[in-house]
Image (cartoon, rainbow, N blue to C red):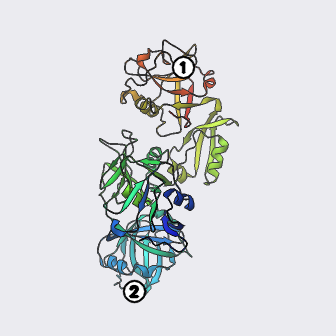
Amino acid sequence: MEAIGLSGEISVEVNDHRIAIPHNSTLGDAIQASETPYMEGSAIGILKKYEGGRSGAIIDYVVKTSKGEFKIELNGESVSAVIWAERFKDYESVSVRWDSRDAIAFGPFEADIIPGKGSVSLEKYDVVFGAGGLDPGNTHLIIALDDHSSEYGAPEDGSFGKIISGTNVLKELGSGDSILSIEPVLEWEESGDHICTSDLSTVLEDGCRIFTYVEVELNPETPEGAEHFFALIRDGTFDVDFVSSSFISDSSLHGEMCKYEGFDPRDRGSVWVRTVGYGSGKVFIARDDRPASIMHSVIGHLSHGLELVQMAEAGQKLMVKTDPEPIWLLGLSFKAAEEKLSALGIELVKKGYVEKDAVVVKQDPPHSIDVMRQRSVEVIGVPDSKLVSIELYDDLAPKTLDFFRHAIDLQFKPVGALPVMMTYENTYIFKAEKAAEKYKEIMPENVPEGKVNAGDIGVTNQAAKRHGMVGVKLDDDDMFGPTGEKFLSTNIIGHILEPEKLKGLKDGDVMYVIESKGSDN
C-alpha cells in the first residue's frame, strides 16, 4: 500500500531530487513541480519503490561531496575492497586532507589495513587506502588524478576501485570540501518493476524514482569523438534504434568516419563510437561491462541517467546533456559569439569581414574541446547577405539530404558552404567541395511534377551523368529542374527562404547556408 501522509501527498524522486506531490499526480505534474530538465516527446524512466527491479549485488558507489558527486567502481574482492564495502558509511563527513597535482586525499579515519612501506603505482582515477606514518589510525582515501607512484602507506593489494564518472568534480575539490554521503548502487535486473514512457499522463506511486535525461561527461582526450557525439545529439536527443542486454545504440551517423582516440574499457555507462568496418559512425552506451576494443573509441561516460539507459526501448528518444557543452559559433553574429565566449573565459579572434553585419562561417579550432583547451578561437566572418537560410524536406527526400548534408558538412556544422559553379539567367548551379556522390547514393526521390517553384533546391540524381549537382531557380519552371536537368533526373530537397540574397552571386563565389528548423516538413 502506498505511504500517503495525512496531507494526501506522496513522495517521489525526480533526477535525484525528492519532492512531495498530491496523491494521483501524473508524470507531467512531477516534472512541472520539480522544474527538472525535460524535452517534449523524450522517454522518461520510472523505477517503482518495489526493490524487485534491482538485485542485491552492489557494483559501485555514489560519493556525494560539497562540490558534486562521483562514482567508484570496485575492482574485485580484494581485502581493501571488502573493508570499503563493510565500512563505507564510516567515511561520510570526512574532509579533504590534502590535494596535489597527482592525487587528492580524504581523511583521516581508522581502517583495518596493513600499511606497506614501498611505493604504490597508480593509474589515473585509481582509488586506494593510504596510512600516513604507516599508522592505520591515520588512514586516508586517496584518489589518483594522474598516473604516478608514491609512498602512501598503501596496503599490499593496492588500488581497490576506480572513478568511473564525475571526474570533473575531482578537479574542483580542495581544502574545506568534504564527503556528504556515500550510497551503494545495486546491480540492475532487467525484469524489474519499471516503465519507460513519454506519456505524461502516467499516474505515479509513492516512492517512485524518475529519470528524465542522461548526462554524458566527455573525455577531454577525444575532441573528434566528442564533436561526433555533439552532431549526433544536435536536436538534444539520443535516438535509440537498437537495444541489447549489453548496450543501446543510435545509428543516425552510420557511415560517417570518426577518428579512433579512446582505448579504454567499455564499462557500464561508457559512451563509444565504432570507428572502422560495418557500423562505423554508430554511437553506443554500455549497459554492462565490456573490454576495450581497437574498433570502438570510448569518448565519455554517463554522470547521470544510467537507470534511464537500462530502461530504454528501441524507437524511443532520450534527452541528453553533455559536459562540456558544444562550442558552435557558426551562424552567429560576432557580437553573439563574443557574448557566448566571454561567459566561458575564451578569447575571440576575428578574421575576414568584421563589420557590424558580419556572421561567423568558420572557426579554428573546429572542435569544442580544443577550443576550451586553447582558451581562444579564431573565426572568419562574411556579410550577413552571404548567409542564406534554407528549409529542408527530411520527410520527402531523406536519402538525398543524407548526401547533401554530408557533402557540405551540415551533418557536423550549423553552416555549410556551396561554391558557385555557374550562373545563367535566373539559375544558380553549385558543386560541393566534397565529392560525396562517389560514396552516397542519389536515387530518384521527391521528383517534381508539373513544375518547380522559384526557390526550390534541386539535386541531380543518378538518372543523369552529372549527379550530385545542386541548383536553385529564382523563377517557376515547368520544363527543367533547378540544376537544368529533366524532372526525372531532379530531386527536390528543400527551399531557399531568402532568395534575394542569391542575386549578387557570381561564378566562383561561395554561398553559405544555414538550416531553418521552423519547417513542418
Where residue 430 appears, as percent x and y from the top left, is: 50, 23
Relative side of 380 to 396, left or right: right
Give x and y (percent) for residue 214: 45, 56
Crowding at mark 2 (Cα within 10 Å: few <14, some 14-19, many 20+): many
Return the disc, 1 or 2, that comes first in the chain's sequence. Answer: 2
The amino acid on which the numbered mark 1 sits, given as a three-letter code, is Asn
Q: Nearer the viewer, residue 149 or 245?
A: 245
Please give left or right for residue 292 compared with residue 399 in the image.
left
**Secondary structure category for the residue under label 2:** helix
Image location (x, y in percent) of residue 406? 44, 34
Name the disc covering residue 181, or none: none
On the question of residue 404 being in view, the answer is yes
The percent position of residue 224, horizontal first and vertical second, equals: 44, 47
Query: In the image, what residue occupies the spot 55% across and 31% down?
Result: 390
Q: Secondary structure at mark 1?
A: loop
User: Relative to the observer, which residue lies in front, 377 or 110?
Assistant: 110
Residue annotated with mark 2: 136
Q: Quadrant of residue 79?
A: bottom left
Amino acid at pointer 2: Pro
Residue found 40% across the figure and 25% down from its top: 445
Q: Is residue 349 left or right of residue 291?
A: right
Q: Find the distance from the CA under tag 1 to the CA under tag 2.
A: 81 Å
Would residue 73 be seen by someone viewing this image from the given angle? no
Residue located 31% across and 48% down the image: 295
**Label pair 1/2, CB-CB below 8 angstroms:** no
- The residue located at (41%, 71%) in the rendering is 1
Q: Which residue is mark 1?
A: 453
Please name whichever residue, 489 or 363, is drawn nearer the observer in this view of the structure. 489
